Image (cartoon, rainbow, N blue to C red):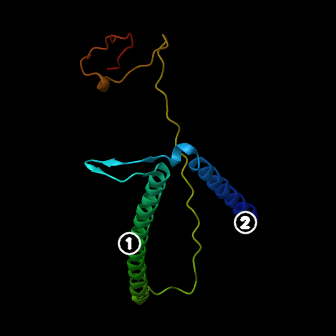
Amino acid sequence: MKYFKWTTISLIVILFFIVVIQTFTQDIFTHKIPLLLFVYRTPEFPIFYYVAGAFLFGLVVGLTVALVNYFSFSSHKRKLTKRVKELEKDLEEVPLPQREHKTEILKPKKKKKQKPVEKPPLDPEGTTYKLKELWEGNEHGEEASDGDKWIN
């Protein structure tokens, strides 16, 4: 599998470079033009040089950022590893409580069965009674605005 993977990657890279070389050897990329950077005008170079220069500039900047991140993260990792070793050493120095000779096997506790929720009784009309506490404005068992009866 490794052989297939590296062969495929190598073929893709080779094909990419063949396409790039064929593209940049076209007549349009060999024309010489000056580049205007704000107020500075560069000497005339082929367009290919500008494209290659931009690619190389991006490559250098990207690799520089990657190296800076790599070294900063590796130093941070070293500090954390050192701190972990110090904490492990401190943990080894802490005395453990005395253990009995028998080791108890802890079994999981059985869950208590919950009682099913009781539904309130239904009146003959099929509507559920509501508790008085839910609505303080009705004190005489009057019907609520939605047609349900209230319990006194």
Q: Is residue 53 above or below residue 150?
A: below
116 sits to left or right of 144: right
Residue 140 image offset from top left, x and y in percent: 27, 14
For badge 2, the amino acid type reads: Lys
Under circle 1, the secondary element is helix
Check disc 2 and report the residue beneath it. Answer: 2
Q: Quadrant of the C terminus?
A: top left
75 sits to left or right of 11: left
For badge 1, the amino acid type reads: Ser
Residue at the location (49% across, 46% down)?
31
Please report contact status of discs 2 and 1: CB closer than 8 Å, yes or no. no
Q: Quadrant of the N terminus?
A: bottom right
Residue 115 image offset from top left, x and y in percent: 52, 41
The residue closer to the viewer here, 91 or 100, is: 91
Residue 47 image offset from top left, x and y in percent: 47, 49
Mark 2 or mark 1: which comes first in sequence? Answer: 2
Check disc 1 and report the residue beneath it. Answer: 72
The residue closer to the viewer here, 105 or 55, is: 55
